[in-house]
Every structure is written in C-alpha cells, then in structure tokens.
Image (cartoon, rainbow, N blue to C red):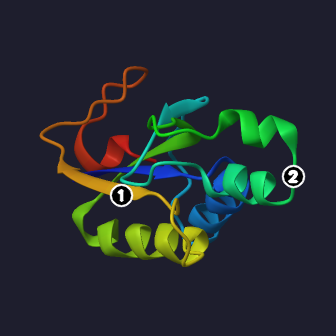
Amino acid sequence: MREIIAVIRINKVNETKKALVDAGIPAFTATGRVMGRGKGQVHYDILKGAETGHPEAIAQLGNAPRLVAKRILTVVVPEELCKMAIDTIIRTNQTGNPGDGKIFVTPIVETIRVRTGEEGNEALN
C-alpha cells in the first residue's frame, strides 16, 4: 500500500475528487485550508493584481516569502493503483504554471478499519 499526499490548488479540489472517483478510487481525505510556499517569492495572482493596479495586491508585494493557500488531499491505495492515482492527480491539476502543487508518496505498513477490524487492502474501500 502507498499513501499519496497531494498539495493542490484550492480551486482544483472538487475536480480532483471527481477524477479520483471516476478512476475507481472512492476513498480519500481532504484537509481544510493549509498555507505553504514553493520556491517562488510571491503568489502569481497577487503579482497580476499588482500589475493591473489593485491596491490590495500592491500592499502584499515585498521581498519576504509569502504563504499561499492550498489544500492537502491524502489517498491510500493498493500498490497496483498507485501510478493511476498519481497520474489522475497530475492530469487534473497540471496547468503548466508555478503553484500546480506537489505529490509525496510513502509506503503504508498497515491499514485497519476501526469499525470492522478489516486489515490490509480490504480496509481501504
């Protein structure tokens, strides 16, 4: 089993959830708003706003690193579904622009469904 942790744009959460369900992966966890940043110094929407003269955007510009709102989607899948889940997340979230997100994959040692005591892959769906 693998845990896939995807940090994605807020506006892509619903589309990503639907794409995963359509791909046969119905179970996942989405967290609320999280804040983070990549290697860029400023959120590109703020930069665009500043370029068009919006005072709120201009006020947020500066040299200090800014944190950007994102969502975290966590999916635990059997080994054989890992690549498909990753490909689905990438296909749904890839815009080609900075800020598309990151995906982290880690091994899962054990999974147990609390309600029934099922273990392993049976506990996933």
Point out residue 107 in the picture as x, y percentages from the top left corner.
Answer: 15, 49
Mark 2 residue crowding within 10 angstroms, few (<14) / some (14–19) / many (20+): few
Q: Residue at x 60, y 75 (%)?
A: 95
Q: Is residue 23 left or right of residue 46?
A: left
Q: Is residue 59 left or right of residue 25?
A: right
Point out residue 93 in the picture as x, y percentages from the top left corner.
Answer: 57, 68
Q: Residue at x 47, y 40 (%)?
A: 63
Q: Residue at x 45, y 34 (%)?
A: 64
Which residue, given by chain and number where applicable, does mark 1 sit on? 103
Point out residue 117 in the picture as x, y percentages from the top left corner.
Answer: 31, 25
Which residue, given by chain and number where applicable, does mark 2 sit on? 53
Mark 2 vs mark 1, CA separation in Å: 34 Å
Front residue (pair 52, 3): 52
Q: Looking at the picture, which amino acid does disc 2 mark?
A: Gly
Instruction: Give the SS element for disc 2.
Output: loop
Q: Looking at the picture, which amino acid does disc 1 mark?
A: Ile
Q: Which mark is residue 90?
A: none
Point out residue 86 in the picture as x, y percentages from the top left corner.
Answer: 39, 68
